[in-house]
Amino acid sequence: MRYATAMRRILLSLVALAACRGSEPTPRYLTVGTDVAAAAHLVTAETHDGVAIVEVAADTDLEAISAIAHDQFHRCGGFMVHDSLAEAHAALAPPVVRATPDYTLDRADVVRAVLPTLDRAQLLGTIRELSAMPTRYYRSEGGAAASTWLAARWQRLAAGRPDVTVELVDQGWPQKSVVLTIPGRGRASEVVVLGGHLDSINLRYPEAPGADDDASGVATVTEVVRVLLASDYHPERTIQVMAYAAEEVGLRGSQEIVRDYKKRNVDVVGVLQLDMTNYQGSDKDIWLMKDFTNAAQNTFVTNLIDTYVGATWGLDACGYGCSDHASWYRGGFPASMPFEARFRDANKKIHSRADTLETSGDNADHAIKFARLGTAFAIELGKGGVGATIAASPPVSSGGSHRWWLALAGLGAVGLMLRRRRVS
C-alpha cells in the first residue's frame, strides 16, 4: 500500500494549498463516503448517513482522491463533484423519488424473440477493440478517440433506422459522452436509460486497457443495441443508451447529464447501470447493489433475471458513488446496478495494466448474462414490439483487432460536433 500512502501525502498537500485562500481559484465541493474521507484525512464540513461534504480548490487533482477510493475501497468514482455548497447539500438530502412505473412483465414474446440473437462473439469483439486502445482516460486523445469510435459503431448499428439518433455530448473534456436514442411510440416522453462508463484510468502507468472496467459494460449495452435494432424493435417509451465520460473521477459525465435532464424535466422512468460485467468472482452470477438504488426497480430486475436470464443472483452494497447509478439515484430517478460479483470479490486487476480480457478467461461468457438482462430490461420497461407488432403480449409469471486508431482518422470530422449535435 506504499502507493496509497504516497497518494494520501499528495492529497494532503493539495488540500493544504486549497486552504490558503489568497489568489486561489473559487472553491468547489465534493460529497464523498466518510470511509474514503477518513482514509484520505480530508477535513469534512458535515456528514450525513455515511456521506461527507468536503471543500476543495477548483484546481485540486481529483485523481488523487480517486486513487484512495480505488486502492483501498475498490470503488470506481467514489465521490461526486459539486459547483456550490447548496448543490452538495442537495446531494446529502434524501432524493425525492419520482413515481415508479408498472413493472408487470407482459412482453414475453418480444423478449424471447430477441434474446436468441445475442452473440457472445460480437460482445467479446467489442470488449477486445475497446481494451486494445492504450487508454480511454477522459482527458486523453485516446479517450476522445474512444468516443468517436463508439459513436461510429452505434451509428452503423442504426443504419436503416432513420428514427434512431447518436449524439456526442461535449462536457468540456476531450472525451465526450455518447448517447443513442430509440424514440418511443405513444409514450415517447417517458425515457428508459441503459448505461456504462466509457473512460478508463490507471494512476500508476499511462496504459489503462480497462477491459472489465468498463469496456465490458459498454460492450454489453452495445450488444443490446445491436439486437434491438437488428430485430426492428420499436418501443412505446423512448430508450436511451449512454456511455458516460469521466466516471472514474467523480461520476462527472453522468452527473452533467442528470443535471441537464432534471433542468429540462425529462421523465426518466428507469435506469440500468452496467459497470463491470465479465469477471465472475463469486458463487452467484449477478449481484444487485441495494445501496443508492431503487428497491422497487431492483425487485423488477430480479424478476427479469428469474424469468429471462436463467442466472443466480444476490444482493450486496458497494458504498457511496461507486458508479454512475448514484448520479441518477441522487437525481430522484429509479436506478439499479447489477454487478458481476459480490463487491468484495470484484476483479482486483481493475485500474491497472492487468485489466485485460485474459483476467476474465478471454471470453464473454459472464457478460452475455448481463446482455440478456439488459435486453429484457429495455423491452419490458420500454414496451412496444418488433416490426409492426406493437400490441401487448400476455402477462407472464415473474417467479422463479486493435482498430482504435481508425477513430483518430475520423476525429477531425466527427470531433467538431457541438453539444447535442447529432452524428449524421
Image: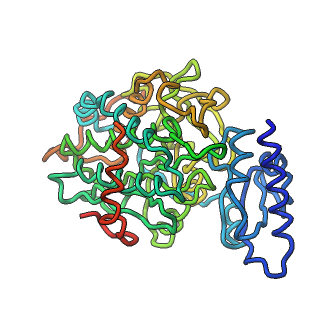
Q: Is residue 350 left or right of residue 219?
A: right
Residue 315 in picture, x, y percent from top left: 60, 31
Say which residue appears at 77% left-offset and 41% top-offset: 3
Q: Is residue 345 left or right of residue 264?
A: right
In the picture, measured across the screen, residue 73 lies left or right of residue 133, that is: right
Q: Considering the image in quadrants, where does the C terminus appear?
A: bottom left
Viewer-nearest residue: 189 or 257: 257
- Percent across and percent down for residue 132 are 43, 39
Q: Which of the two residues, 134 or 219, is positioned nearer the viewer here?
A: 134
Q: Is residue 393 above or below residue 84?
A: above
Question: Residue placed at 68% from the left, 66% from the top?
Answer: 90
Residue 322 drawn above or below residue 250 = above
- How many tags in the picture? 0
Residue furthest to the top in view is: 283
Residue at position x 84%, y 49% in the image = 38
Q: Residue furthest bottom?
A: 23
Q: Residue at x 75, y 50 (%)?
A: 33
Residue 400 visible in the snapshot:
no
Q: Nearer the viewer, residue 264 or 100?
A: 264
Measured as percent of width and height from the top left, residue 58 is found at 70, 70
**Which color mode does the image show?**
rainbow
Determine if residue 18 is in view.
Answer: yes
Where does the N terminus fall, quadrant-wise? top right
The location of residue 245, given as percent across then percent down, is 50, 56
